[in-house]
Image (cartoon, grey):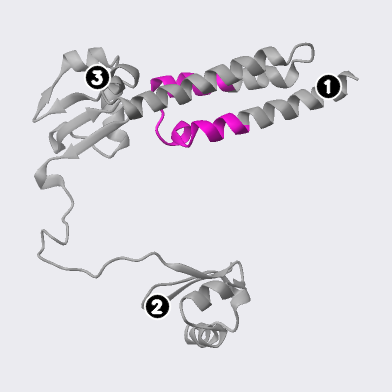
Amino acid sequence: MEFIKLIGTSFLSVISLFLIAKIMGHKQLAQLDFFDYICGITIGSIAAELATELEAPWKPLTSLVIYGGVAVILSLITHKIPLSRKFINGSPSIILDNGKLYRKNMKKAKIDLSEFMVMCREQGYFDLTDIQTAVLESNGQLSILPTSIKRPSTPEDLNLEPEPAHINTEIIMDGRIMKENLKRMGTDEIWLQKELKKQGYKNAKEIFLGVCDNNLKVTLFKNI
């Protein structure tokens, strides 16, 4: 009997967690701020407790709903009232700007020099003189603006006007021809077979991945 209850509470936990995650949205994964991080951990712990609570599963379920509800309400508040974002989510802090380190902002953000240096190296900056501005975002991520001389050249800098980039379309995946994608591009399997022969392949089964751009240029990756 207890085993059946355990199965029931486990399913209840999974379903509740799934529904709450859906309601809260992708923010939990994409851009965690401090409260989202704490809330995510707590909801996970409560869901685990719910899965094994046989006597009174409604107790952890209630807590789960409350935490999820509060997270959704705070999200709505920050969306409707921009002034509340600074209090609820925090605000970005300038850590370095124009060769000057802001010790006060580092202290406020609870990071030390060693942590800041690690965050810079993680983004490929081993020399602080290469950095124009470094901002610690409210979600704990460090945003870096390199100095002008260290910024990558763009087509605009070189007075070039390249053609717009387009996403490639998969036409072969794991040896299988994607007929719908071929049709959408205005081509067919006969055309694809000719392209395969041009590149020295007999059939699509030899290809792990094949992609095609808007100019019908085919790139093939052999099935090894």
Residue drawn at x 18%, y 34% is: 127
Q: Could one spot residue 30 in this view of the protein? A: yes
Q: Quadrant of residue 83?
A: top left
Q: Earlier in the sequence, mark 2 or mark 3?
A: 3
Residue beneath label 1, please? 5
Cα gap from disc 2 to disc 3, whole angstroms: 50 Å
Q: CA distance from mark 3 to mark 1?
A: 52 Å
Give left or right: position of 212 versus 111: right
Task: Kindly identify which numbered label has been placed on residue 139.
Answer: none
Residue underneath mark 3:
113
Q: Earlier in the sequence, mark 3 or mark 1?
A: 1
Q: Nearer the viewer, mark 2 or mark 3?
A: 2
Q: Secondary structure at mark 2?
A: loop
Residue carrying label 2: 217
Q: Tell me which amino acid carries mark 2.
A: Lys
The outermost residue toward the front is: 80
Left or right of 30, for residue 209: right
Q: How many dots with numbers? A: 3
**Rendered location of residue 53, percent (x, y):** 74, 15
Identify which residue, 101 or 60, lies in the foreground.
60
**Residue 4 within the segment the image draws in magenta:** no
Residue neighbourhood size for the residue with mark 2, other residues' Cα within 10 Å, grouped as few (<14), some (14–19), many (≥20): few
Stretch in magenta = 18-43
Location of residue 204 by image quarter: bottom right
State the residue at coordinates (40%, 72%): 213
| Front position among marks 1 and 2 | 1
Q: Nearer the viewer, residue 115 or 52?
A: 52
Residue type, label 1: Lys
Indicate the position of residue 147 as horizontal and vertical percent values.
12, 41
